[in-house]
Amino acid sequence: MKAIFYLKTCDTCRKILKSLPTTDGFTLREIKTDAITLAELEEMHRLAGSYEALFSRKATLYKERGLKDAVLTEDDYKNLILEHYTFLSRPVIVDGESIFVGNSKPVVEAAIAHLR
């Protein structure tokens, strides 16, 4: 799979997409209008090692639902990500057997270096 999962209303996602040396050959997936599938999420999980690594604790719903105080399992993370797009840490860049999750500086720098 060669795909970039992002949110078009997210300034950070747009900035990161512009900073990438290339997006040629990638499917750009706007996750609000084109939700991720179970198969895509399972592939991301295989590459990332856990659903928790794909989960965003910055989501407004995370705070609104009081999930901060809950003990979540891998199945909980998986189901929450499938339930609502904001629970996916973004952007997620999948390039074959490589995955880059989130917008931290080290992750973005690694993605840029990988795509050069």
Image (cartoon, rainbow, N blue to C red):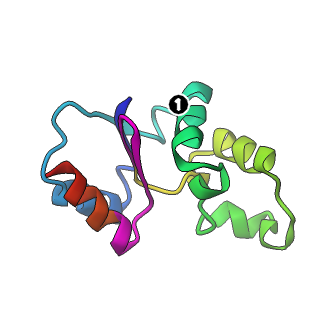
Q: Quadrant of residue 113?
A: bottom left
**Residue 6 can be seen, yes or no:** no
Position of residue 94 measured from the top left corner of the image (x, y, whole percent): 38, 41
**Marker count (numbered):** 1
| 60 relative to 73, above or below | below
Res 41 seen here: yes
Q: Residue at x 46, y 32 (%)?
A: 34
Residue 64, position in %: x, y? 75, 67
Q: Classify residue 89 as left or right of residue 110.
A: right
The region drawn magenta spans: 93-107
The quadrant of the rendering that contains the N terminus is top left
Left or right of 5 in this view: 72: right
Q: Residue at x 36, y 34 (%)?
A: 96
Residue under the image location 29 percent in, 57 percent down: 111
Q: x, y (%) of residue 3?
A: 35, 36
Q: Residue at x 76, y 49 (%)?
A: 74
Residue marked by disc 1: 40
Amino acid carrying mark 1 in the image: Glu
- In this view of the protein, which residue sits in the foreground, 17 or 44? 44
Q: Is residue 24 left or right of residue 51?
A: left
